[in-house]
Image (cartoon, grey):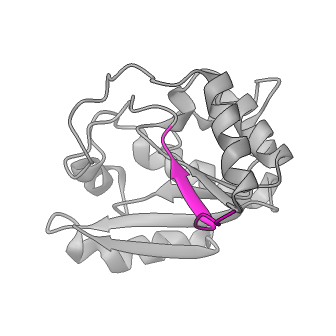
């Protein structure tokens, strides 16, 4: 039996609660195509083929009904689970019986500016996106130290002069890793 790549990114939903100008596509209201049961079957097949790392991305994965159960299943199958989220819905997870934070190994947190104003130039649709990301980084570093944190910054002409300031913000609660992406 041939092996698949070690890491696979999945998109459990295309829905998103932001409208970022550099995103993969403008249609964030596409109906979810697979049921949770179909995702479970697919994850089992991927695991049997040698996939060891599973990244849940989107859209915004936390908009997917049952995402906690999905991440629980991925973790139970032995995947190293990464969640890529804009963090706006992360506080809600704390009250769910299946809290996604209990089943992930890494989280991708987007911070594209050193303030809500600069961040808002790129993370369009919710003025709270900056605070949500910074608060999530602090929460995870404090209450979920087992989760590897990666801050992801998209570098554009709108924020290129703010990159060092973002680094200053990150010094307050350092992530494990900081990725800069050119757009």
Q: Which residues are magenta?
A: 1-11
Q: In this orientation, which residue lies closer to the viewer: 155 or 54?
A: 54
Kindly give the residue lying farthest to the left in the view shown.
157
Q: Residue at x 50, y 74 (%)?
A: 178
Against 35, is 116 above or below?
A: below
Kindly give the residue lying farthest to the front in the view shown.
1
Q: Residue at x 45, y 24 (%)?
A: 33
Q: Residue at x 74, y 58 (%)?
A: 105
Where residue 138 appears, x then y in whole percent?
Answer: 66, 56
Is residue 143 toward the left or the right of residue 3 in the image?
A: right
Residue 100 figure quarter = top right
Q: Is 5 covered by the magenta stretch?
A: yes
Q: In this orientation, which residue lies closer to the viewer: 165 or 38?
A: 38
Q: Quadrant of the C terminus?
A: bottom left
Where residue 17 appears, x then y in whole percent?
Answer: 38, 30
Is residue 26 toward the left or the right of residue 69 in the image?
A: left
Q: Is 161 covered by the magenta stretch?
A: no
Q: In this orientation, which residue lies closer to the viewer: 30 or 113?
A: 30
Q: In this orientation, which residue lies closer to the viewer: 183 or 145?
A: 183
Against 133, is 127 above or below?
A: above
Q: Main secondary structure of the magenta part?
A: loop
Where residue 176 appears, x then y in whole percent?
Answer: 64, 74
Confirm whether residue 51 shows in the render.
Answer: yes
Residue 39 figure quarter = top right
Is residue 144 toward the left or the right of residue 40 in the image?
A: right
Q: Residue at x 64, y 31 (%)?
A: 67
Where residue 149 appears, x then y in whole percent?
Answer: 64, 64
Total residue callouts: 0
Is residue 108 toward the left or the right of residue 112 in the image?
A: right
Q: Quadrant of the N terminus?
A: bottom right
Confirm whether residue 171 shows in the render.
Answer: no
């Amino acid at each position: 039996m041939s092996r698949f790549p070690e890491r696979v990114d999945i998109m459990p939903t295309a829905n998103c609660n932001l409208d970022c100008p550099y995103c993969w596509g403008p249609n964030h209201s596409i109906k979810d195509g697979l049921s949770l049961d179909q995702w479970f079957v697919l994850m089992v097949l991927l695991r049997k083929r040698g996939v060891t790392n599973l990244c849940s991305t989107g859209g915004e994965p936390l908009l997917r009904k049952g995402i906690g159960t999905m991440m629980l299943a991925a973790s139970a199958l032995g995947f190293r689970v990464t969640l890529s989220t804009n963090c706006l819905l992360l506080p809600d997870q704390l009250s769910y019986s299946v809290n996604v934070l209990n089943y992930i190994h890494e989280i991708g947190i987007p911070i594209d500016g050193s303030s809500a104003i600069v961040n808002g130039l790129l993370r369009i649709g919710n003025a709270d996106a900056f605070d949500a990301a910074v608060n999530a980084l602090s929460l995870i570093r404090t209450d979920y130290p087992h989760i590897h944190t990666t801050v992801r910054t998209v570098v554009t002409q709108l924020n290129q002069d703010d990159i060092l300031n973002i680094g200053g913000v990150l010094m307050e609660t350092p992530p494990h890793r900081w990725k800069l992406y050119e757009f």
